[in-house]
Image (tube, rainbow, N blue to C red):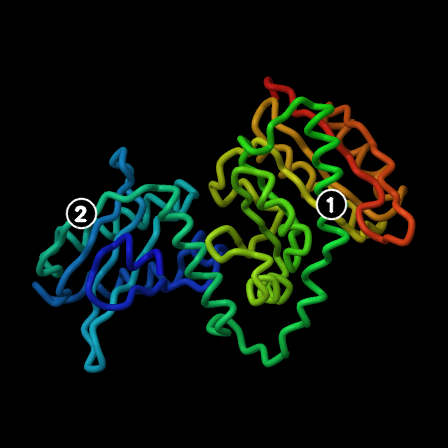
Amino acid sequence: MLLHELLKVDGDVFLIEGSFEGLELNLRSLDYLDKLRSLPYGAVPAAVKVTDKTGEALGAAFQNRHPDGDFWFLVPYPHAPPARRQTELMVGDILGSGAVAKSKSRKVDGSRFRAALREYLSVSLVERALCDCTKEAEPMSFAANDERDRSIKKLLARVAKKYETDFGKVDALEICCGNGMSTRPLRGIFRSVLSVDNDKCAVCNGLYHGTLQPESTMVIDAMRLTQYGLGLFGCTAGFMLGTIYEFNKPIWRKIFEEALRATNGGGLLLFTVNQKEEMDFMQECYASMGIDGEVIDNRQKGSIYDSWAFVAVKDAGR
């Protein structure tokens, strides 16, 4: 696992929280840190302060004694400033109290650290460590479709040519990735793809079949993208978004807003839907945000996928 590789410690490394939402709320981690604060002098064998190459603090890990083998709990710092400050203060209290027998610092690449968190939670999901699900995995045919792969690649080639974009130099964010059927063709086109969805069962199936990669996948709500400190992307994409009904239009509008916020100035928005009415709604939403996008009739005989595509460039000043 990447976490163990980065920390370079003896013993297994675990996260206390079981989701990215949990890492932001940080409740279990704070409870654990509170217990450490009350321990006597030298009761914690060791700690590792984790920073990136610029010296920015990323988190802290603490060694725990156990008869079956010592292990480590890693507490990554949340993205939200209030939660981050509270966690950093508690870690500082513990390290300054004398409860930790010895501590050291470890500088790591920040992007690899974030990939390690994604890998840990993805692998834990597939191993059923994060749920009580007993369902069988869906067949591979549910997660892979060669004809659709070709169709998506053709659409991307058309968009790249018209908008004079070299996707091989672009880091992409894919929202609503589901089981990764649309993710598979993206990986050979973009420099990198981070895929997100809030349906952990669909994501689990994609990870199981390899259409999604552990270090590049997150189970998060697309209505809250900017709460997770993902950074900005040169392209934000989503394929077969929906279904969009009247009752869930506010949800989809929020998703479209967050997708715009996650995109670099000058970056591309690229989305597909099944129905023209869904495309009309998407186009209206972005028009109200000052984004004038192109609608592409991408209907193909015998296919239900990606019938309508929306492409827009985010103004550099937005």
Residue 164 placement (x, y as % from top left): 66, 22
CA gap, disc 2 and disc 1: 43 Å
Decide if residue 122 is on the left or right side of residue 254.
Answer: left
Circle 2 or circle 1, nearest the eye: 2
* N-term-proximal mark, 2 vs 1: 2
Q: What residue lies at 46% left-to-right and 65% top-to-bottom? A: 123
Q: What residue lies at 35% left-to-right and 42% top-to-bottom? A: 110
Residue 223 vertical position relative to residue 166 in the rendered view, above or below: below
Residue 171 vertical position relative to residue 141 in the rendered view, above or below: above
- Quadrant of the frame with the C terminus: top right
Residue corresponding to mark 1:
252
Q: What residue lies at 22% left-to-right and 49% top-to-bottom? A: 49
SS for callout 2: strand
Q: Nearer the viewer, residue 88 or 167?
A: 167
Number of the label disc, if any, that sits on residue 105: 2
The image quarter containing residue 219 is bottom right
10 Å crowding of disc 2: few (<14), some (14-19), many (20+): few
Residue projecting furthest to the top: 317
